[in-house]
Amino acid sequence: MKYIAKIMFCTVLLSNVTYAADALTTSQQITQLNTQIQTQLKALQTQQQQQIDTLNNQLQSQLKKMQTDLQTQIQTANGQTQNQMKEMQTALQQQITQVQGQIKH
């Protein structure tokens, strides 16, 4: 009877030790998985940040080009407008001179 009791006690004890070892292994596995996930997330975050930086640089370049193109168009339009104003001023001055000449005669 004592022998059977000892065997049962040892079986229960081994069973508890095995369960504790399994639990520890499970805990270690969870920790390892968490570490892997965190590493993957950091790598993904770094990759996304690089993509964002690249896109930002591309956008800035495009905006600078657009700004330069618009400035050129504005300067061209201003030059054309100034030329038209000078032509109009010259034409009006000629008409004024003609009218003044007609009034004198």
Image (cartoon, helix red, strand yellow):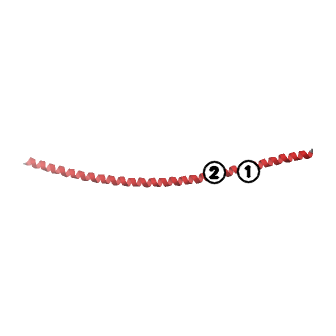
Mark 1 is surrounded, within 10 Å at the Cα level, by few (under 14), some (14 to 19) or many (20 or more) other residues, namely few
- Measure the C-alpha gap from mark 2 to mark 1: 18 Å
Q: Amino acid at mark 2?
A: Ile
Please name the residue that numbered disc 1 is placed on. 25
Which residue is depicted at the point 30% across and 52% down? 77
Which amino acid lies under the numbered mark 1 shown in the image of this protein?
A: Thr
x then y, percent, for residue 23: 75, 48
Q: How many marks?
A: 2
Direction right: furthest residue: 1
| SS at mark 1 in the image | helix
- Residue 16 position, x and y percent, is 80, 47
Which mark, residue 79? none
Residue in the image at 38% along x and 53% along y: 67
Q: Label 2 belongs to which residue? A: 37
Circle 2 Cα neighbour tier, 10 Å, few/some/many (<14 / 14–19 / ≥20):
few
- Secondary structure of residue under mark 2: helix
102 left or right, relative to 29: left
Q: Which label's residue is closer to the chain start, 2 or 1?
A: 1
Measuring from the top left, give residue 36's x and y in whole percent.
Answer: 64, 52
Nearest the eye: 104 or 39: 39
Q: Is 54 placed left or right of 65 in the picture?
A: right
Classify residue 85 as left or right of residue 66: left
Q: Residue at x 51, y 52 (%)?
A: 52
On screen, residue 90 versus residue 10, left or right, reads left
* Residue at left offset 86%, top offset 48%: 10
